[in-house]
Amino acid sequence: MKARILVIDDESAIRDSMRMILEYEGCEFLGAATGEEGIALVERESVDLVFLDIKMPGMDGLEVLGRLKAVAEDLPVVMISGHGTVATAVEATKLGAFDFIEKPLATERILLAIRNALGFRRLRDENQSLAKTIELRHDMVGSSPALRGVLEAVTRAAPTSATVLIRGESGVGKELVARMIHRNSLRARERFVQVNCAAIPDELIESELFGHEKGSFTGATDKQIGKFELADRGTIFLDEVGDMSVRTQAKVLRVLQEGEVERLGSSRTLKVDVRVIAATNKDLEQEIDKGLFREDLFFRLSVIPVFVPPLRDRADDIPSLVRHFAELFTRENNFHAKRFTAEALAALQRGRWKGNVRELRNTIERVIIMTPGDTVNASDLPDSVRAEAPPAPAPDERGDQPNTLRGFKESAERAFLIQKLRENDWNISRTAETIGTPRSNLYKKLEQYNIRQDVDS
């Protein structure tokens, strides 16, 4: 596609010369003899680049530049001057000029300005497209009551600098919540530094978090800046914080309490201003009882606790998630878009999704790749999704009484849990609090007895 380049200059000889150069280079030429005419062209035409003379009768080039930037802020403008001064060039740059060239116009200088300006615009457009894709990738999708509770917590937490502890099963989207908190915080323009505590060996995690000096231990051939330093004025996300060693926990606690870090092998203390967001799929209260997690760190981290529900508690969001993942995958991979039928969406909603949102996303990508047509039917879904296990019947539906003590206890426990869930409108957190058990334990019981709201309500 030809680049459309506008030349605004009161000298017809300059416009004719520019036309010859631009058309020879395969560009489309647009010309204007006055600033007003040029502004009107930009308002009604699609223009990729403007060459603008500074000295013109009536409205001068600097005034035109200001008006052009008000109409099309991202439009690159190259200023042309027969009497260029440093002060004029500085003023033009302040107003947003991309480049500044002097008369007489040399062809090589014009072509260099075109190449640089169009290359910059193309790079900026690509960056904007990439940023949009990244933002889509990190969106929390859905409108279920369970998800609305998460979004409300994010809204309350984001504007503060308080530490946040995000809890939930693997694959529910804890990282997305952390990124959303950062994106809506006062630190949004600063860095978001992520550390997966479970993926770093114990002997390296302190170096990773706090940095080290050259020669501080075997293999430390260079100085390394730690993640807390990198996140200064921004946010650090400690994913899977429950897998951190007790020794490292003590040092993280110091950062939270004092705002200070020390690189390994250094006696110098560094001040850092970091907002800490942590996440875990472990029951930290149980880890505390086992002596594997510091209680004082737990209280420091959980100033604002956020629980992300599993996908089975927000099945109403699955159609929206399916469409979101399908659009994202086709956009990123230049794939032909495919439509999911109502039967396919219903089958996906009935799925168990032990891997939660992450498993659903992987399934959608696989289905899009493997389905030959433009429509995804229920028959195109993996067997694991379509083969929905029948729910275990409630005690009063079995038609006979359990013949063992264990069977009777399990039947009674299942009935009790269903009753309490119904009384609490199937709110997991409220039910767990009512019956005096951790949410994680209640989830295990629901899995054990195959209790589901769509069947047992």
Image (tube, rainbow, N blue to C red):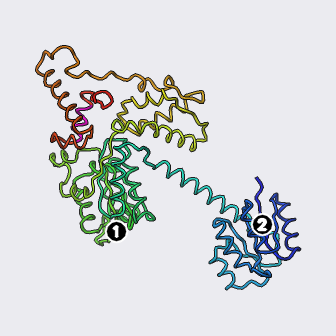
- Magenta segment: does it hold 445? yes
Badge 2 amino acid: Leu
127 or 249, nearer to the observer:
127
Amino acid type shown at disc 1: Asp
> Where is 103 relative to 21, above or below?
below
* Residue for badge 1: 273
Provide the residue span drawn in magenta.
Answer: 439-446
Callout 2 secondary element: strand
Q: Secondary structure at mark 1?
A: loop
For the residues carrying marks 2 and 1, which lies nearer the camera in this image?
A: 2
What secondary structure predominates along the stretch shown in magenta?
Answer: helix
Q: Is residue 440 above or below residue 44?
A: above
Quickly name the residue at label 2. Answer: 6
Residue found 53% across the figure and 50% down from its top: 133
Task: Indicate which disc, 2 or 1, sits on the residue closer to the N terminus.
Answer: 2
Residue 205: x and y in percent read 32, 54
6 sits to left or right of 174: right
- The crowding category of the residue bearing disc 2, from other C-alpha atoms within 10 Å (few below 14, some 14 to 19, many at least 20), is many
| Lateral position of residue 426 relative to residue 73, left or right | left
Quadrant placement of the C terminus: top left
